[in-house]
Amino acid sequence: MPSRILRAAFALLPSATLALSACTSTPATPVPPPASASAPDVRRINPPKLESAHLSERILCYRPMRHGSPNLSVEQAGRQTIAHDYGHGGSGWTLGPGSVKYVVDLAEAAPQVQARRKDEPVTVVGAGVMGLFTAYELVQRGYTDITVVAERFDRLTSHNAGGLIAPVSMDNDPAMQALVDRIGIDAYRFYASIARGDVPEFRGGAVVVPAYFERRDDSGLEPYVGVVMKPAKDVVLDFGNGTRREMVAYDDAIFVDAAVMMDHLTQWLGTRVRFEQRKVERFSDLPTTLVFDCAGLGGGALNSDAAMVSVQGHLIMLKDQRPADLQHMILVYFDEGKTEAGQKVKRSFYLFPKRLPGTGPNDVGVVGGTFVEGATPETPNTAEFERMIDGAKRFYGM
């Protein structure tokens, strides 16, 4: 399977029914109604309100992507056993629970860890999805002296993530893809149990909703089909304004409300672990002999890891919507281009039913997104926000 940099990584491709670019707008090709029972189902979807009065917070985030694959490994460095779990790109939530279990299993198989008692102190570096899920997993396995150390605990990329559970926005070596898919399938099972209401501490954090893509290969979900998911269906989305789009639908896709889940994790861990706010410069500065490295972008500096790269993303929260209109997910790929900073950008349009804690009942929905490898806060590329909304409007035929 080829690597996915947002096709797996928002690698945005034109299609016969969606010919979009950053500078032009091509009308949607009309799709005739089904002529027989074997024709695709037509599904009516009301577009979100995308006028400026319905756009809320603009958010920049920086995905921690590692070329080749995430670092899922264990090393012995002097007195310390260091278990690495970082570099998941835009698939941190997609892989999180499965990735954490895989790495904790690796750590517990190390002879130095097998000789430890579970009441001995453990340090988790990083407070994003990987760090918090690692602390959660350790508590579940009976560890009783856990400290989560991080430079920041709020407004992280893990809070801002869109929430589509699909292995995209990565750059995996084909030799690693089978492992990544297996980890993703394990994570899907965990989220499915949350959606069923079987994990009360995360109630409402994950739900099953349809996810729409232009092609099956765009989704990254085909390895899940027949294992934990049903096959995709050919459908036609009718937006009620004369515009229709031929798509494929995964009706058992999972959406994770990332900011809500981060709150759930933090609250659950609050009485079970310690949180310490400080920047870790070297693992050797930590007093514990067992360390879980979930530092995200910080993993690059801590490990002198040249394969790590920051990947900038743009998204806009929506407000004053009709929540019933947004109970689905859409991800389509557009074009490649250059930002105002001269950086290569891969553009897409996605819509997910994301909420931010503390907002009103009708403040639901997020529109994204971009993939700008190597961009930093010094190159915010803010013109992408307007291009993103323009692309969304063209997709819906507005």
Image (spheres, rainbow, N blue to C red):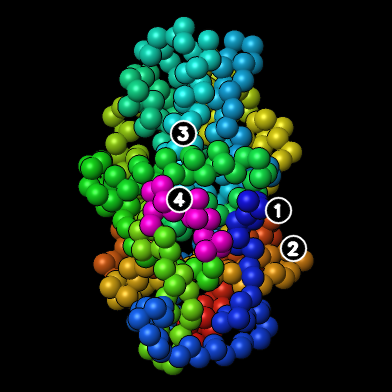
| Amino acid at circle 4 | Tyr
Give the CA separation, mark 1 to mark 4: 31 Å
Where is mark 3, residue-wise?
100
Alpha carbon distance from label 4 to label 2: 34 Å
Q: Are marks 2 and 1 in contact (CB under 8 Å)?
A: yes
Asked if residue 220 is among those painted magenta in the image, a careful observer would answer yes
Q: Are marks 1 and 3 in contact (CB under 8 Å)?
A: no
Q: Which residue is mark 1?
A: 374
Between disc 2 and disc 1, whose residue precedes?
2
Circle 3 sits in a helix, a strand or a loop, which is it?
Answer: helix
Eye-nearest disc, 3 or 4 = 4
Q: Residues within 10 Å of mark 2 (few under 14, many from 20)?
A: some
Look at the numbered disc 4 and give the secondary structure of its residue: helix
User: Most extreme residue toward the top, as rendered?
Assistant: 115
Residue ID for mark 4? 224
Front of the two marks 1 and 3: 3
Q: Is residue 27 left or right of residue 21?
A: left
Hey, what amino acid is under mark 1? Answer: Gly
Label 2: which residue?
A: 343
Instruction: Where is residue 296? Give x, y as percent.
Output: 57, 40
| Image location (x, y in percent) of residue 208 | 32, 58
Spatial CA span between label 3 and label 2:
33 Å
How packed mark 1 is, by other alpha carbons closer than 10 Å (few <14, some 14-19, many 20 or more), is some
- The residue under the point 44% across, 72% down is 234
**Image x and y of residue 150, in percent:** 50, 34
| Magenta residue span | 216-230
Q: Of label 3 and label 4, which has the lower sequence position? A: 3
